[in-house]
Every structure is written in structure tokens, then in C-alpha cells.
Image (cartoon, grey):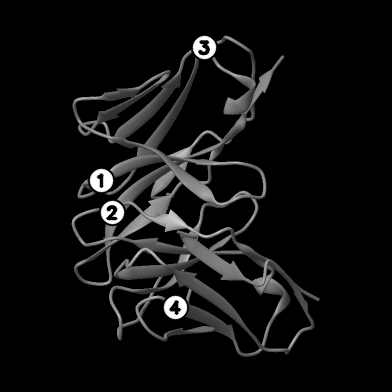
């Protein structure tokens, strides 16, 4: 049972480049989330997917898009990267609506030059 | 005002000391409360849920005061391995009826030999 996995672990982009961050979970969880974490700030929700086939904006969605490919996979795309998107990105999943507990992947460290 | 506020620290304590962290939250409708632990450059991991009656897990005790919108975490007999950042987390209603987690920016603890 790998839990929540994320790829890549590290990435450096130039301003204007695009990329997709991948996330997968093997725990059969319904809900999945993308957060970003910046120094001195708490994790901020970018997008979430309450169930397969649905996605919704979180607190800081601008500059990002997401795809819930199936129950296991939830990807985050940066269409035109900006230096302000330099951050650590965490994917998380939640088992079912009766619990608020979330389980996190190891994170992707992204630098945009 | 931030939705979840924590003293950022750092707290530097000797092994064996007792240390307490505090957290306040602004949304009186919040229903679920957690402490997560985050090691340097790692993902957040659930430490414990916080219940109105207070709860204990070994050396860790969590308390919730709904009237004051205040959460605390007490660590007794600190170990070197307790060195980490402790995140106060509450659920909030976001975007209609969807419940999401809001994270404090964390309190950094270093336990010294």
C-alpha cells in the first residue's frame, strides 16, 4: 500500500513553461486535494475533487487547472508558470465524507525562474 | 485576521521538558479539529484529532475550548524525535456545503539534548 504518491519530487521551470504535477492514491479514497505551501504560511487549497468526475476551486486557484482522471489520479497543471508559483505542492486524499482527516503525499518542490 | 492563528515559535526546549502550543480559530462553525506534525521538507502527518472533552495519546494531550475558539497541544517529557513543526488544523465550510481543512502556519519545535 503506497498511500499517496506524487511525481516529480523536484522540478525547475522557466517563466512561461507548462507542466503537470501527478498524484495518485491506492487507498480507494473518494476526495482528493491539491495544496501549496509557502514559507511562513499554512497550506492553502488550490483545487479539490470531492469525488470522481467533479472538481472545484479552492482558496488560490488562479494559474492552475486540474483533472480527476479516475478515482485514483488527480493532476495539477500549470499552463504558463510564473515565479509566484514557486512553492511546495502537496496532494492529499480523504477516505469518505464522514471524516475530515486527510492523508498527504510527499510533495513536489517547484521552482520557477 | 487569519482563520487559524498559531505562535510560529521557534520553541527550543531541553529533552524532558513539557511544552504547550496554542491555536485560535475564527470560524465558530468549525466542527473538526486536528494537530498535524510536519518534519523538515516532508509532508504533514496526522498527530491527533482534538475533541471537546480533551484527549490524550501517550505524552500528547490536546484540548479544545469552543467558547474561546482555542485549541492547545501539550507535549510532556519531550524527546529529540519530537522536533518538528506542529500544524493546527480546523475544518471550515467552503464553497457551499463542502467541508475543507484550514491550516495554521505552524509552530516550530526543537528539542535540545
CA–CA distance in space, label 1 to label 4: 26 Å
Marks 3 and 2: same chain?
Answer: no
Q: Which residue is mark 2?
A: A100
Is the C terminus of chain B in the top left, top right, bottom left or bottom right quadrant? top right
Q: Residue furthest front?
A: A1
Give the SS element for disc 2.
loop
Q: What chain is tagged by disc 3?
A: B
Do residues under tags 4 and 2 come within 8 Å of each other at their CB atoms? no
- Between residues B49 and B32, which one lies in front from this camera angle? B49
Q: Nearer the viewer, mark 4 or mark 2?
A: 4
With B17 as the anchor, is B112 left or right in this view? right
Q: Which residue is mark 4?
A: A73
> How many numbered circles are shown?
4
User: SS for tag 1?
Assistant: loop
Contact between marks 2 and 1 (CB within 8 A): the answer is yes
- Give the distance between the C-alpha atoms of the residues marked 4 and 3, in whole angstroms: 41 Å
Q: Which residue is mark 1?
A: B32
> Which chain does tag 4 point to?
A
Identity of the residue drawn at 65% across and 73% down? A85
Q: Secondary structure at mark 4?
A: loop
Q: Quick check: A27 above or below B84? A: below
**C-alpha gap between disc 1 and disc 3:** 27 Å
Residue B94, given in percent of the width and then of the height, sits at: 29, 66
Amino acid at each position: 500500500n503506497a498511500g499517496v504518491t506524487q511525481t516529480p519530487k523536484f522540478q525547475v521551470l522557466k517563466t512561461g513553461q507548462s507542466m503537470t504535477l501527478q498524484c495518485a492514491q491506492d487507498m480507494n479514497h473518494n476526495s482528493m486535494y491539491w495544496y501549496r505551501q509557502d514559507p511562513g504560511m499554512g497550506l492553502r487549497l488550490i483545487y479539490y475533487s470531492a469525488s470522481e468526475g467533479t472538481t472545484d476551486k479552492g482558496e488560490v486557484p488562479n494559474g492552475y487547472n486540474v483533472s480527476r482522471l479516475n478515482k485514483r489520479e488527480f493532476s495539477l497543471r500549470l499552463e504558463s508558470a510564473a515565479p509566484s508559483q514557486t512553492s511546495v505542492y502537496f496532494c492529499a486524499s480523504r477516505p469518505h465524507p464522514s471524516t475530515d482527516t486527510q492523508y498527504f503525499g510527499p510533495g513536489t518542490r517547484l521552482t520557477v525562474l | 485576521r487569519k482563520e487559524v492563528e498559531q505562535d510560529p515559535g521557534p520553541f527550543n526546549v531541553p529533552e524532558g521538558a513539557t511544552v504547550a502550543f496554542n491555536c485560535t480559530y475564527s470560524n465558530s462553525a468549525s466542527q473538526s479539529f486536528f494537530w498535524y506534525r510536519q518534519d523538515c521538507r516532508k509532508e504533514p502527518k496526522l498527530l491527533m484529532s482534538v475533541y471537546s472533552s480533551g484527549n490524550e495519546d501517550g505524552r500528547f494531550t490536546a484540548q479544545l475550548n469552543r467558547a474561546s475558539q482555542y485549541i492547545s497541544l501539550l507535549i510532556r517529557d519531550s524527546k529529540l524525535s519530537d522536533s518538528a513543526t506542529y500544524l493546527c488544523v480546523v475544518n471550515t465550510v467552503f464553497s457551499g456545503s463542502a467541508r475543507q481543512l484550514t491550516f495554521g502556519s505552524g509552530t516550530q519545535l526543537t528539542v535540545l539534548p
